[in-house]
Structure formats: C-alpha cells, structure tokens
Amino acid sequence: MNRPWLVVGLGNPGPTYAATRHNVGAMVVAELCRRAGETLSSARGLRAETARTRISGAGLGLPSADALPVVLMRSRTYMNDSGVAVRKVADFDRIPVGRIIVIHDEIDLDLGRIRIKAGGGDNGHNGLRSMRSHLRSGDFTRVRVGVGRPPGHQDPADYVLKRFTAGERAEADLQVSLAADAVECLMTQGLGAAQNRFNS
C-alpha cells in the first residue's frame, strides 16, 4: 500500500488571520479540499484539522485504480508551533518526511510567483523553523507562494499579518489556484515536472 502524502497549509488559526498573507498556505489547502469535495475536521489529539482523500492524474477526489492517498492538513496551533501538529499527524499516519509538502507564504517572491523546492533552510520563516525542529529534518518539499516585500520600512512580521488589498485580491486568488495545481502536479508527476511547469 502506498504511504499517503501529507499536504500542510501553514497559517494561523481563527477568523482574524484567515485572509492574511501569512495564511496563504492554509488558503491553498482549503482550495484542495474544495476540489475534492472534502471538509477539514478537527482530529482528536493531533492539534490539527485534516481531510483524507485521494488524488489521481485527473485531480483530487476522483476514483482511479492508481489514485494516491493524501492527508490535507492545517494546524490548530499558531504558526510558530506548526511543527507540533505536523509531527503528530505525520506520526499518526506514518508519513515519512519525504512525502510531506508544505505550502507557505514567501516575502522574497512577488505576488503571483510560485517556487517549488525540496529541502533547504527556513529563511526566517517561523512555521518552517518549527517544522524543521519537530521533524528533525528539513527534507520536505516546499511550495513557496509569493506575497511580496513590505512597502517602505514596514516590519515584515506586521506586513504578513495584513490582508491582501482590494487591488491584490484577484491576483492572490489566481495564485492560490495555481499553487493547488502545483501540489497536484507534485504528487502525480514528480518534483522535476512541477518545477518546470510552475517555477517562475
């Protein structure tokens, strides 16, 4: 039996943070759930909301003899403690680090750009730092979703906790959809194909 993939959308819990730049990873997981016709539900003792589905070459939630199992997840902890929940879910489903995909905001990429990479450091991102600490490895795959640099001298920590502006909203929605496509491509076609198609 294939080990499931674990797809993690980083963000902070609660309606206050739901539409902020820092929660773009959680937005992508919500889009993947929508495509699969699934709803995230609280997983007892795991400090996370999860949905279990399958993905085939035709997309999420479609029956296929070669469909791959996947756990879609967002943490119920705050960003700085994301690794606690990710480790609990990975252990529960016996998912190795190499089958974890994390989707997160990236201020070093302009809005509208996506980059996929395997492994690496945390580049100052507290969610990634927490994951690396609790998984004792950075060898998971990252889908980096650009949110742009803060204007002027604005503190990056304040900037990512703000919502997309009205002028950015359409571009952000398109980017969320493309990032969801990238996750599907990663699982069904592999890292190289996903990088060739989506890295910009």
Image (cartoon, grey):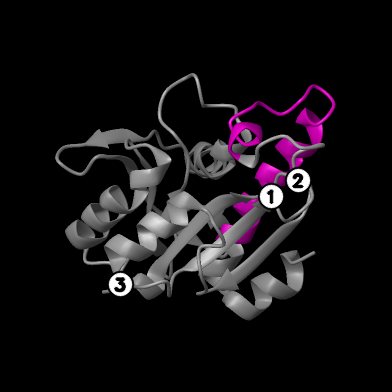
From this viewpoint, is residue 171 visible?
A: yes
Where does the magenta region start and end? 157-183
Q: Mark 1 points at which residue?
A: 107
Q: Quadrant of the N terminus?
A: bottom left
Give percent across and percent down for residue 107. Answer: 69, 49
Residue at far left of view = 45
Disc 3 residue type (three-letter) = Pro
Q: Mark 2 points at which residue?
A: 149
Label 2 secondary element = loop
Label 3 secondary element = loop
Q: Are marks 2 and 1 in contact (CB under 8 Å)?
A: yes
Residue 153's disc is none
Disc 2 residue type (three-letter) = Arg
**Residue at 55% across / 51% down in the picture?**
104
From this viewpoint, is residue 5 visible?
A: no
**Residue at 46% across / 50% down in the picture?**
126
Q: Do the residues labelled 1 and 3 touch (CB within 8 Å)?
A: no
Horizontal placement of 123 versus 88: left or right?
A: right
**Res 198 quadrant in image:** bottom right
CA–CA distance in space, label 2 to label 1: 5 Å
